[in-house]
Image (cartoon, rainbow, N blue to C red):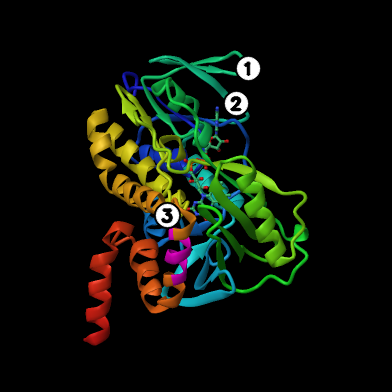
Amino acid sequence: MGNEKQVVIVGAGPGGLSAGIHLRKSGRDVLIIEKSHFPKKKFCGGLLTRPAMVELEYLGMETTDAELFRPIRSLIIHHKETSATIETSEPFFITDRERFDAALYQIYVQLGGRIIEDSRVRAVANDHCLLLVDGREIEFDILIGADGANSRVRKYLNPQEKSRSGFCLGKASMPDIPINPPDGLHINLNPLYRGYGWCFKVDGRCYSFGVGVENQGEKVRGAYEILCNTYGVPVQNSIGALLPFNHAAKIVAQRHIFLVGDAAGLVDPFLGEGIYQALHSGRLAAQTVIDGGSNKEYICALGDLRAIYRAGSTLQSILRYSSVRNMFYSLAIKHHGFLRFVCEEAVLKKSYHYMQVPQLYYKYRSKRSG
Ligand SMILES: Cc1cc2nc3c(=O)[nH]c(=O)nc-3n(C[C@H](O)[C@H](O)[C@H](O)COP(=O)(O)OP(=O)(O)OC[C@H]3O[C@@H](n4cnc5c(N)ncnc54)[C@H](O)[C@@H]3O)c2cc1C
């Protein structure tokens, strides 16, 4: 233990905790530095796909806990005056992020993981030292940057990078929402903006409601007002959060410093899904450290996540014109049998990615005719 390299993780979200838990499971000493304290709030839809649930099982999470993971099979996709209802053959799961992150934190602490809470990292001073806002200095041999969309570690590895991000505006608690919440997972598409609105029940006390769009001044606000009008929700008292939207870090690992999750900008640019990406990249970073691997090996291991990212990014650029979006959304609603198939294969299971839709179409046709 005496000669063991000191591994420090910045941020105790799903990415940092996944890395921390996997490192602890292999007996490594690890320290997480977190700017807030548990239980902590995070504005997030909390929608989980099948690969995310698999990652949670690797972490030792009780995924059959119906209190924490509510299965949902009905997706209602709205576009203008039309909508398509899709019943998926296996469920998505919805979780409350506050309780979800707290459950991961419990696993980490029970495994003997160390954490300093209420301590914000101000900057990475050099390749071996972090500076905290309270003036303390923390030394490290290996650093994992899991500090989300506004990552300090990312800034250290990518000093020239201009900040460019998506933004979400919404609400996350029941008392704010004076409507009878509709059942199912509602997705609202609007060709006026890239991104979408969502509305669904998380549990008896929480409701997830908001829009995630490109961070272009009035666009976010405009999109949010349209969503509020649709559901009869007051615009006031909303909360906002950054979403790294189509914004992968150029350098995700260098020397002994690794970025995971939102810090690496791994969020699917089309869907806005990032929990799976955070859990998975956290595990890959931990495995690289455990194996004594290099940053190149980590970058290589990220291949599948980068393929999902690239496909989402390409789809977003295809949809950059509102006329194309309008046509795309209308077609999707019209052919809802195929839409269901794409949702299951490319979103829920991730056995295909968005750019493989032509292959999916052949598979769908042959399934229907066979
Ligand atoms: C409104 C919204 C809805 C979303 N809905 C979904 C969804 O339904 N499904 C899905 O899969 N994804 C969703 N996402 C994306 C998802 O929330 C993120 O991708 C995911 O949380 C990334 O995990 P992470 O661990 O990388 O970062 P985070 O969860 O952001 O965790 C980062 C941690 O680092 C800490 N931190 C930050 N800076 C510092 C610092 N300087 N010093 C110390 N600590 C620091 C933070 O306090 C935080 O605990 C949504 C995002 C938003 C904004």
Q: Amino acid at mark 3?
A: Leu
* Residue 290 % position (x, y): 28, 34
Using the numbered discs, state the Cα–Cα distance from disc 2 to disc 1 in whole angstroms: 7 Å
Classify 138 as above or below 353: above
Front residue of 328/212: it is 328
Q: Which residue is mark 1?
A: 134
Q: CA distance from mark 3 to mark 2?
A: 41 Å
- Residue density around tag 3, few if under 14, some if 14–19, many if 20 or more, within 10 Å: many
Residue under pointer 3: 319
Q: Secondary structure at mark 1?
A: loop
Indicate which disc residue 119 carries.
2
Q: Earlier in the sequence, mark 2 or mark 1?
A: 2
* Residue type highlighted by circle 1: Asp
> Within the image, what quadrant is residue 240 found in?
top right
Find out if the beta carbon at label 2 lies less than 8 Å from the nearest ligand 1 atom.
yes
Q: Where in the figure is residue 63, as x and y percent of width and height?
A: 46, 61
For image coordinates 29% across by 57% down, the residue present is 355
Where 190 falls versus 135 (above or below)?
below
User: Which callout, 3 or 1, points at the residue further toward the start of the chain?
Assistant: 1
Which residues make up the magenta segment? 324-330
Q: Residues within 10 Å of mark 1 (few under 14, many from 20)?
A: few
Assess whether residue 195 is covered by the magenta stretch: no
